[in-house]
Structures are given as C-alpha cells and as structure tokens.
Amino acid sequence: MPIAKKLGSQPIYLINFENYLRPKRPHKITPLQCFDKPAKKPETKCFKLQKTLQRWKLVRWWRTAHIKLSKNVEQMPLPRFLNFLRARNDDGLCKSKTGFEIYCEMSSIHGFHVFVGAKTWQRVLWWLLICVAILLSLLVLIMSYGMSAETPTRSYIESMMQPLSANRLPLPAITICGLNRISKQQLSIRANKWSVPVQMLQQLPWLSRRSSPGINQTLIKQLSDQNETWSQLLEQLSPQICEQQLIGCKWLGWNPQSCKQLMTTVWSYTEGRCCSLRQTSDNPATSLTLRLATKIEDYGSTATAATGFQVLLHEAHTSIDAATQRVLVPSGTEVHLMLKPYSTHATAYLDSLEPNTRGCYLSNERSLFSFPAYSQDNCLAECHSERVYHICGCVHPHMPKRSHWTLCQLAQLQCLQQQGECTLQKSWDQLQSLCNCLPPCQFNRYEVHTDVAALDASQAAPPTNDALYNNLNASDELLLHIYCDSLNAEQLRLDVFENWLSFIGTFGGITGLFMGCSFVSVFELIFFVCVRPTCNWLTRQQIRYRLRRRRRRQLAAAAAKGN
C-alpha cells in the first residue's frame, strides 16, 4: 500500500512492492520518488522576447505552414522502390525492423542513420542529399579519368642534384660540321679537269644544301660522261675537317695528342662531311678542347653568310640531321660550351600502355634496319630514305639504306631535290602519320650555355708549355672548349598519370570527401546485401526442415497410436 509522508513543504511518496515483486537483492531497493513541479522561474528578457515573437502573425503563420507541410509530405505518394523513406507509425517495438533499417543503424556512411526514427520529410531530404553526393563523386571520378586518358603519362623531377658519377651519364657525341660545303681549291681543280665553268659547278644543289629553281641537265650529263659517281663527287669536293682543319685537341685535360685517335669522319646527307667525337666518358670532369682552322680562302659555297663551324650535340647512337641541336661557332673567337645534362628514365608501369597512348617507344619495342639503337632521329632518317627509294628508285649515298637498295647518281639529282623540299614542307603531324616515329621513353638531353670571346691578335698570348696555343692565328682560327658546368645532373622520371595505387587513393579520397565511405563501408554493404540475407535464408530453411520433420513424427505417432 502506498504510504505518504510530508517532509517540509514538498510531499514525498514512497511505494513499496509486495513480497513477490521485491528484488532478489534487498539492498538494491530504490523507492519511487515523485516531486511536485518546481515553482515558476522568473521571466527574463529573452523569455519576454520569445512571447512577443509568438504573438506576431508571421511566426504563427510559419508554424502553421510548417505543420501543414509536414503533414503533406507524410501523405505524399512515393514510388514503390522509395517506400523505405516513409516514416514508421509505431515506436519500433511492436513491429520488427527491416533489413534496410538495421543497415542504416550500423552503417558507417554519413547520413544513413537519419533514416531510422526520422519523419518522412526528413528521410526524403537526406535521401536527396545522399543522391547529390553520389552524383558529385561520380562526376569528379569521371573528370579524373578523363584527365588520365587525355594525358596518360607525366614527367616528374626525381632529383635536381643527381651526381654524374652515380648516374653514369656520359657526355654527348660532339660533331663538328663546317659552314663551307665545297672546297674552293678542289672545285677549281675539278672544273679545269672536266672543262666546266666554276660558277656552274658551284651552284649544284645537295652539295651546298641550297634549293635551286632548276638543275642544268647539260652539266649533269657532262659530269656523268666523266664516269664520276655522286659519291666520288662528294668525296672530292667536300672540305676535309678532321684531316686538314682540326689542328689540335685536348681530351680529359691531358696534354695535346693526335686528334686522329679521337675524332672520326662521319657523313650526313644534310650536313655533308663532318668530324665527330663519339668516345663517351663517365668522368664528370671530362672536358674537350679543340683548335680549328676556318680556312676562309677555301670557301667555295656556303649556305650562310658566316664563316666558322657548327657544333652538333647528340647521343652517340643518334644520327645527325637538320633538326639536331647545334651551336654556331664563328671564326676568330674562343668559345666555351657549358653543358647541363638531363636524364629521363621510364618506369615499369609504362609497359601497360600502348605506344600510341603513352606517346613514346621503350627500348625493345621498335627496331630499325640501319641503326642498332632506336631514336626518333634515326627513325625519321630511315622513313625519309624509304620514301625517296620508293619514288626515285635509289637513295642518297649518305642516307640509311638496305643491302639491296641502289645509290642515286647525278641523273637522279633533281628527284632527290624535290623529295627533300617536300619533306621540309611537311608538318610534324604529317611526318608522324607517315613514319610513326615516336620519341624514346628513355633518353638524355643536354642544355647548352655559350660564352663567346673574340681573339685579339694584338694581345700576346701568355707563356705556356701547352703546344695547343702556340702560333695561334686569331683571324682564321678558333678555340672551342666543351665541358659540364656542374658535377650534378637533373634526373626526370617518366611515369603513368595514374597507376592502381594512386587510383585507390583518388577513389578513396573522392568518395570519402563526398560520402564518408571506406573499405569498411564496402564490407558492410556486402554483408547486408549478400551475407546476411543468405544466412537468414539458410536459417529459415533449417527451421522449416525441423518443422516438417516434427510434423512427420507427429503423424507417424498418431498413426501408430490409431493402430
């Protein structure tokens, strides 16, 4: 029975349970205490302001409209696949929760917990927000994929201070080509021998790399009658740089030595006879000093109005052409060429991309018929040579060629000139579509800084034991120094724009930013979509099997009892 006591001004009601309702632990008994409502609090300014706002029609209208809108949303018809957004009419105790509601309670994805215990309009609002977040994440992922497809490769700077000795980056091949294409002395000798005017012989194209409006066919026929091949004509008229114009050289800082041991004669169908150093060294302190004689009096035909030499810098396995990197060295000067090397290497991820997709060839993907190693210049030279052979039926004596191809003679000179002019007029896209000569993925590049000082004959040279500087002719000779300006190189890495590891990071960052997803969220979804329904189905099948077995036993027992 309830007992009422009054302590002070507040009544306290103590309710003791009957013996059968008493807890098993008497010391845990807690009587039910009920206190009267406390006295009214004094009205503050904020409370008065709230009461004043409630009297305004706008506030009352907003509360009424809010209630009506909530009721309309509650009664709004939803499609069948969105029935889960309708709020429950019970408190969640009388009706079992659906699998979706259980998933929302346990999901780690942001916003899904609102679907449990919320009103219909709140569920619809959060469903729209989640759909917008999913669409935005898909949009950003598609944009990221588009960037990866547009630029599948990217160059990264691995090190700007990579030691040359550690990287074993060699010096480039150094090729010296004269601006003079025809020896004036040899031209006069051959003109007298063939009874041909010097001026007429001097204007032949492909000797001076000039384009002329027409070729004197009479001169060509007259030279052909002399039983002179084009190769012999080029050998006889081209200046001999290594043999006659290279006076001295110094390699690796040693004493002057015979240049014939270092420099070799090479031919190019665009530059003519040149003198090249292709001995590379891994020593970062490597330097080369050359003393060259211009021999201005022997200039028979030149493509420019200057006198001197061209210094071409390229890799040792690469041929030279009109696009090779070069520096003009005028006569009567002392020139310092300071090289800064750049090395680019490719990663293993590039193997997964097609050559046209990555925009370059790996070392083992493209082979050439005339060169042992692939380079873009070598590929273009072979492509141009093939086009010339298919059109003219022969190739230039110094072009790449197959073993069964024939060399062009003077009669085919006009055809070769036309093909050379057509090649120069083609754009890079046209050459690429014809030749498919992509650049290599791994290569070395050299940036050149030049310092030029004029040689002054009036100034006496300082006394030295170096024979390289003795009796220097300042008006007709030049000094060339080539070396690295630093003991370090810049190393670049050519890699894919996005590999599987970076894709996981991008995907996880985007989905985590917009939806708060992670691998745990994926495992939760797999569990509630696949594992949990499968387990429930197996449990129901097991219960049905047991019920059927019990029913069969009951029927068998009833039949036995009836008998």
Image: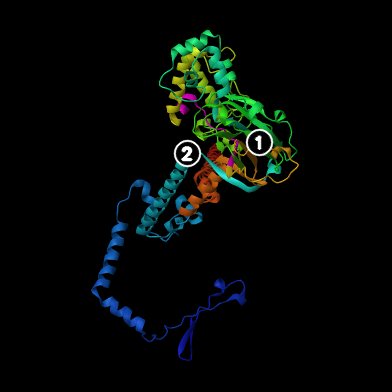
- Residue 533 pos. (x, y %): 50, 44
Residue at far bottom of view: 8
> Up-down: is 89 above or below 244?
below
Colouring style: rainbow
Give me the residue at 54% from left, 26% from top: 181
- Residue 535's disc number: none
**Which of the 4 quarters of the picture holds residue 373?**
top right
In which quadrant is the C terminus drawn? top right
* Residue topped by disc 2: 149
Question: Does residue 263 show up magenta in the picture?
Answer: no
Q: Identity of the amino acid at label 1?
A: Arg
Q: Residues within 10 Å of mark 1 (few under 14, many from 20)?
A: many
Residue 22 in view (yes/no): yes
Closer-to-camera residue (31/427): 427
Closer-to-camera residue (87/356): 356
- Residue 512 pos. (x, y %): 50, 53
- Residue 396 pos. (x, y %): 53, 18
Q: Residues within 10 Å of mark 2 (few under 14, many from 20)?
A: some
Closer-to-camera residue (115/480): 480
* Residue topped by disc 1: 291
Q: Is residue 128 left or right of residue 397?
A: left
Question: Does residue 432 show up magenta in the picture?
Answer: yes
Q: Secondary structure at mark 1?
A: strand
- Residue 69 pos. (x, y %): 28, 61
Give me the residue at 70% from left, 31% from top: 259
Query: Label 2 to label 1, Cα distance in Å?
Result: 52 Å
Q: Identity of the amino acid at label 2?
A: Ala
Going from N to C along the chain, the mark reached first, 2 or 1, is: 2
Residue at far front of view: 458
- The region drawn magenta spans 430-447
